[in-house]
Structure formats: C-alpha cells, structure tokens
Image (cartoon, coloured by chain):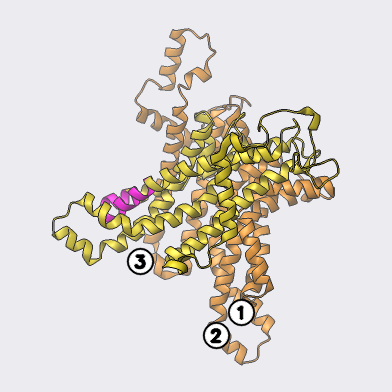
Amino acid sequence: MSGFFIRRLLQGVISIIGASMIIFVISRLSGDPILMLLPNDAPTSMIEETRRNLGLDRPLWVQYLIFAQNALVGDFGNSYRWKMPALKLILDRLPATIELAMCGLLFSVAVAVPVGVMSAVHRGGWIDRIGRVFAMLGQAMPAFWVGLLLILVFAIKLNWLPAFGHGSWSQLVLPAISLGWYPVAAQTRIVRSAMLDVLDSDHIRLSRALGTPERLIIWKYALRNAAVPLLTMLGVYFAAMLGGAFVVETIFAWPGVGRTVVEAVFARDFPVVQAGVLFTSILFVMSNLLVDLSYGLVDPRIRNGR
Amino acid sequence: MGASMFRGVPWLPLLVIAAVGVCAAGGEAILPFDANELDLGIAFKPPFWLAGGDMTNPLGADNLGRDILSRIMAGSRVSVIVAFYAILFSGGIGAVIGMIAGYFGGWVDTLLMRLIEIQQSVPSIALALILAAALEPGLSTVVVVIVLTYWAWYARIIRGEIMALKGRDYIAFARVAGVGTPTIFVRHLLPNIFNTLVVLATLQVGQVILFEASLSFLGLGIQQPDISWGLMLADARQYITNAWWAITMPGIAIMLTCLSSNIFGDWLRDRLDPQLRQL
C-alpha cells in the first residue's frame, strides 16, 4: 500500500525535475541571457564579470544546478518588465486561474452528468443522439472560437453578460463555459458507459425487482457507482483546464497565470515565463498524481500490481 | 473486400477533406481574388445573403476589404502543411521509440517510459509558449511544438502493441533462425502496427488543426503576411462588433475540417483497428 504511494510520489518528483530541465534547456536555446540583462553598449569586461557572477561561464549542467537550486527556494529572478520577483507575480495571479479552472470544471460536469445519465437510460433515444452530435461538434471547435462566439452573442448582440474583466459572477460565466466546453464530450462518454455497465448489474436488477422507484434507482443507486470513473478523472480534467486557461484568459482579459505568461512571452520576460510554465507543470503533475493515488484507493489491483 | 470495403464510407466528410486538399494544392491559381489584396471600398462588406452583400464576395470582406472566401481557401494551405509535417514527424519518432521500448524492454523501456512521463508533465500549450519565446514564431516552430507534444502519444500506444506482438511464435522463430533485429523491425513488426499508425495519424489531424489555430490566434504561430485560420480569427477579434461574419467564417472552416477528419478517423478505426476504440 504505502509502497505504491511512495513509488508514485517519486515518479512525480522525477517528472517535475525533468520538466524543469526541459524548461531550462529551451530557455537557453534563445541565446545568451547576459545580453538581455545588460545594456547593448556594455563593455566586454562588464559582460565577463556578470557572466562570472551569475555562473554562466560554468558548464551547462552546473548552470542547471544553480537554476534548480534557486528555483527550489522560489527564486526565478526579477521580472524584466514588472521589476518584481517573477514567482510573486505568478502566485498573485494564481487564485484567479484556479477560480476559472474550477468553474470551467463545474460547468463541464454539470452538463456531462445529466446528459451522460439520460443517454445511458434512453440508449439510442433522442438525448443520446443529440448528445453525440454535440460531442462531435465540441471536439471540433477550438476553445478560443467558442469564447469569441459567446462574446459575439451574449455580450455584443444580446448584451446580457460582460465580455471581459474579473470580479463579479457575471464576468465568470462566459470564460468558464468556453473553458469547460471541450471536455464535456469526453466526460459525457465516461458517464454514459459507466452508467450502462451499472444499470446492467445485479444489484440494480434486484432493486428493480423489489419495486424501488426508477428515479431513485437511476439518480441515487446507479449514479453513485457510475460517478466513480468520472470522479477519479477529475484531476486530469483540472490539469487540462490549466492548459486551456492560457488561451481563454487571453480572450477574456482574465487576470490569471495564463494571460500573464502569454504577455511575458511577447515581452521576452524570461523569468516570468519560466516561473509560470514550471508552476503550471507542477500543478499538472500534482493533479495527475492525485488521480493515480485515488485510483489506488478505489481499486486495490492497481496499487498491488503493475 | 471489393464493394464491402466502401460500405458506410462517410462521403460528406470525405468531400470536405477533398475540398480542403484541393484548396491547399491549388494555391493562388484557384483563388477568386488575391488573398492579401486590399480594397478599402468593400471593407466590412457582408456575406451575400445579407443586405449589401453579393456573389462577388460570397462570404463578405474583412476590415481591409480582403475577400474572406479567398483568405479561407488560402489558409487551408497552412493547415494542411502543418498537419502533414507534424503527423509525419511525431508519428515517425513516436513509432520508432515505441517499437524500441516495446521490443527491448528492460532498462531501455524504463528509461523511455520515464522520458514519456516527463514530456507529458509539461502542458503542451505551456511548452509551446516557452518554445515560442525562445525561437522565432512561425510555421516550423508550430511543427516542432506539435511533434514534441504528440510523439509520446504514439510511442505509448505502439509500445503496447509491440509488447503483445513480441510474444508471438513467428517473431521467436525469426529470431532463432538468425534474422537480424533491423529486419525483424522492418519486415515483421512494422507491417503489423501499420494499421494502428494510420488510424492514429487520421485521428490526430483534427487535433493538429485546432492546435495550430490556437497558437496562431495567440500570435505564437503563423505570422503575417502568411494566412492561417487562427490568425484570421485573431484579426477579426479586433473588429468583432463591426463584422460578425469575419469571426464566424474561419471558425466554421476549422470546425468543418476537424469534424470531417474526426468522423473519417472514427470510421477508419472501426474498419482497421477496432481495438483502439477507447481512444
């Protein structure tokens, strides 16, 4: 039991170290960071001295160790643009991103569960068929286009909801829907197939035979079991939301990590890009880790075998 | 085979795919107008079914009076080129790594699987952002980002298939008979995973097109004056209040193309490799 947890935790740590290596190597591809720190007309002696001070004259793997050591204590350097520690900038924006990701997830589950359940109960019926059409459409529409269409219809034509900003509930609706739109299809499919399995099981047939009301059977006894696969997958979907947030935050001027990193890319603000990407990766790995651990809790076969 | 081979072929999606292919191959020769030609006289001209629109510019014009239909047709070229190279390289690299991991097993397998896990711990769009910050944005960067994101997907699935194949008698016989490892790979393993590769590649088309559009929309993909559907949407966003058609039409092009390739991919999967159904 604990062996599984420790092994999986160790894998998570290795993944994060690997991610930090990828981020480090890619940012070094862009050329000499010294030239971005110093003015263009800096004398050669000054360049050499700064290079020595920052350890940039050492081999690449030593440089990586310096980067990793600083990253461990939360030091990614100062943002070139905002003149404040990059990590603080990211942490300040993090709550807004988590708020958006949570609401996006809530939206997708709120749609996927009833549609998935009804599609399974009335298999081949009109809900099942419409659900399948929407699933096909959902997989073919980029999140940012969904966002733009929502703005066009609900903010510009109907003037019901604001098109951007952060703070009130009404400003959360459109971004959350654009973010939650894409995973609805996959989640519906998970609920539907789990529901089909459960409805076919002995304990449900027994409940039916005993004359339990159909509504109670479906929404209480069956759904409670059918929800397990979706619940264990929620971490994966939360992680996917963090990726989607980069685009959706940009469209809706949402003050989160995603938009900050996108802006930092254009400003060539490397400390912020590194801190933001590494931080998202850590959240990503942690969500996936939680998924695996929850599988282990639910299904003993996984934690014992391979 | 014969007639049954074509039973249930999704003709409509195939037609859409063919149309996109023709537009991409035809290039400038088949465009109604030069896709970058400005004509401020027809700026914000609506599509033909609205008042003020006509069949000269059936889908209307954008803020600079460029013909939207011509631009959509021209933009298909980028989608096709990106999809072709991205799938070729991610599928090729992923297949080779998956075959090596699955066939040799042991520490090679452990190492490669760890590499896959590490790669998948960075969200792909974040990887794209940091690459775009480091390299020049453009078509080749988009391809590099997609290859880095998707090779692991191929590798994981191919590895599983190879592990199942490896235990078959004919592979063991070949080995005992002294057939070299490269020959086993090319003659005995590759033909058996070929169907899987084709199905995976077809299912990837839609995802690649969405990915390219998102990157270009953020300004990290295709750059002006090249034309991409995602870039058109980024432009149209600036004047979303003036011309709703400029934001709708390129999106519909993306949607129809992805929808068609997904439907075709599903059909192909059911035909060639039904075991992949859980994808």
Query: Residues under labels 1 and 2: Cα distance?
Result: 9 Å
Residue with the mark numbered 3: A305
> Is residue A9 shown to the viewer in this render?
yes
| Left or right placement of residue B188 versus residue B15 in this view | left
Viewer-nearest residue: B229 or B147:
B229
Residues under labels 1 and 3: Cα distance? 30 Å
Question: What x and y, as percent, mark residue B102?
Answer: 30, 55
Residue type for callout 1:
Tyr
Amino acid type of the residue tagged 3 in the rendering: Gly
Q: Residue furthest bottom?
A: A210
**Chain letter of disc 1 in the image:** A
Mark 1–mark 2 CB contact (< 8 Å)? yes
B33 or A172: which is nearer to us? B33
Q: Say if B244 sits above or below B38 in the image.
A: below
The residue tagged 2 is A203
Q: Can the viewer see residue A278?
A: no
Measured as percent of width and height from the top left, residue B19 is found at 59, 48
Residue marked by disc 1 = A221
Mark 3: few, some, or many residues within 10 Å (few <14, many ≥20)?
A: few
**Dots 1 and 2 on the same chain:** yes
Chain (orange):
A
Q: Secondary structure at mark 3?
A: loop
A16 horizontally vs A306: left or right = right
Range of magenta residues: B93-111
Q: Quadrant of the N terminus of chain A?
A: bottom left
Which mark is first along the chain, 3 or 1?
1
